[in-house]
Amino acid sequence: MSDPKCDIGVIGLGNMGRNLVLNLADKGFTVGVYNRTTEKTDEFMSHEAGGRSIQAGRTLREFVDLLEPPRSVLLIVSAGKAVDAVIDELTPLLGESDLIIDGGNSHFSDTDWRAAKVEKLDLGYLGMGISGGEEGARHGPSLMPGGHKQAYDRVHYILEKAAAQVDGEPCVTFLGSGSAGHYVKMVHNGIEYAFMEMIAETYDLLHRGAGLGPEQLAPIYRGWSQGELGSYLLEITARIFEVKDPQSDHFLVDMILDQAKQKGTGKWTSQDAMELQEPTPTIDGAVSMRNLSVHGQLRQQLEERLGRSEPVQIEPERLSSLLESALYTGLILTFSQGMALLAGASRKYEYGLKLEEVCRIWRGGCIIRAKLLERLRLAYQDRPDLPCLLLDHELGEQVRSGAPALREVVSLAAASGIPAPGLMASLAYLDAMRSEHLPTNLVQAQRDFFGGHTFERVDREGVFHHQWQQSRGSV
Ligand code: NDP
């Protein structure tokens, strides 16, 4: 008797795909798999799939035939051209109402046109962000699907079982139409860049500033991760400081080149935020710092030529306590930027996002999971159309009381010559957002002076232009 047909198919047996397949099989689903390089399929089937209800196709035709119609096919291949290559090869083999789910980090605008192209063939399409890395994929990621609700309803029971669970709820929901899922994943990654940058800045202040080594840093970060800053990124940071280099006598972190790579999702967040005119200065600063970090030789040359400031001495225990508070405040301010961007994008692209649900599915499984997200969820539950997180009473109070520590840390970093653009941008965002008056009246005057771009007045309606050159010197 032949094997029963599979509940779902997965194309791509890379780091994420392999782990998701094992996760799906362990949750009781029969899974069909296919990978372009057949050696990888063979290796996976003989070394990892062991005893689970997983069947492999060596060709795409074989793979498609393994699946129960209407078929659901999850793509976890490299973002970009690979997704199109697979879709072009796959679609002629699929039948009406079959569904393709792109689970990679596709740019949201690609998802829009790909969905239109695939749906024209009477096939379903979902763009689904996945977060949690390999570990999340294996044991329960946060899943961010978007597209047509009917398509989601076809596979929701599979996704809900595969996702991380928090308080008995799966970290997945239908997020909204079109590319909503990939947009939310992109902003998730933007926030991730910002949080990582600010953590790195606290490390710099404690390490280069206060002279603490990894063995002293590990308990500090572990302590923070057990308090209100509880989060995946702080947990792994504490673990990183404990790891010795197997190839030397040093801690591994000290042997890693200080040049950060990126795959683009943080940059995309900043790019689209600029497009939508939504301020995300902490995320922008984090992307710029990664870009700056790769100029290692130039940095060395400039340090030799220009020198560096001497770090201001501060008692490490007090510094650590200031940093904990500053980082927590910076994290709220970063979420405030990211959530405002999501609200703006939802209006512009008509996603229909529910921000409470976004916070809910980020509470587990994903890289930015943090205790704070439950507080954020409650803020949107109280007021789904909250225009700015800082207007929530409790979050506003937390930021107000954390601001002095953030300001002291920023001053200390500036005085010590330690770059802290993430924390600095967070503070500037706060100070600007709570300024009834900004100096942008002068910017408007300058624009009108050199370009006749006009300005509005504080005392009457309308649009005005002034002949600035002619009134030079007049009072
Ligand atoms: P890997 O590099 O580990 O695997 C890439 C997979 O894509 C392989 O199966 C590869 O097949 C396949 N592939 C590449 N090019 C083609 C092509 N032209 N045609 C067919 N198949 C192709 O990537 P990951 O598993 O890490 O990532 C997969 C997706 O998930 C990406 O979009 C990534 O951004 C996203 N993602 C990754 C996370 C992570 O932590 N790694 C977290 C969240 C999302 P072959 O073996 O034949 O080369």
Image: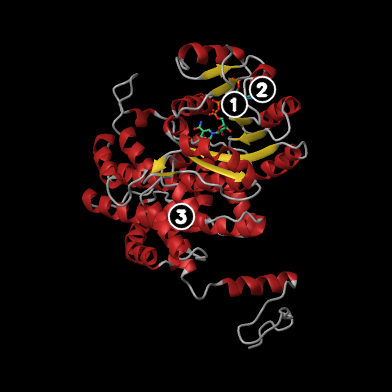
Inspect the image, locate mark 3, and give the three-letter code of the amino acid beneath it. Thr
Image point (47%, 33%), residue name: 133
Residue located beneath label 2 in the image: 64
Which of these two is toward me, 146 or 409? 146
Q: Position of residue 28 (x, y in %)?
A: 46, 27
Q: Quadrant of the C terminus?
A: bottom right
Q: Against 145, is 436 above or below?
A: below
Q: Nearer the viewer, mark 3 or mark 1?
A: 1
Q: Against 29, is 49 above or below?
A: above
Inspect the image, locate mark 1, and give the three-letter code of the amino acid beneath it. Gly
| Residue 109, disc | none
Q: Is mark 3 within 8 Å of ligand 1?
A: no
Q: Is 10 on the left or on the right of 391, as rendered?
A: right
Q: Secondary structure at mark 2?
A: helix
Residue 218, located in which quarter of the rendered image?
Answer: top left
Residue 402, located in which quarter of the rendered image?
Answer: bottom left
Q: Secondary structure at mark 3?
A: helix
Q: Against 34, is 317 above or below?
A: below
Q: Residue furthest front?
A: 1
Residue 105, located in which quarter of the rendered image?
Answer: top right
Measured in 3D between alpha carbons, the distance from the residue under mark 3 to the one under mark 2, in whole angstroms, is 43 Å
Q: Which tag, 2 or 1, sits closer to the chain's start?
A: 1
Q: Which tag, 3 or 1, sits closer to the chain's start?
A: 1
Check disc 3: other Cα within 10 Å, few if <14, some if 14-19, many if 20+: many
Q: Is 69 on the left or on the right of 117, as rendered?
A: left
Q: Quadrant of the N terminus?
A: top right
| Residue 21 visible (yes or no) | yes
Residue located beneath label 1 in the image: 9
Check disc 1: other Cα within 10 Å, few if <14, some if 14-19, many if 20+: many
Residue located beneath label 3 in the image: 334
Check disc 2: other Cα within 10 Å, few if <14, some if 14-19, many if 20+: many
Measured in 3D between alpha carbons, the distance from the residue under mark 3 to the one under mark 1, in whole angstroms, is 37 Å
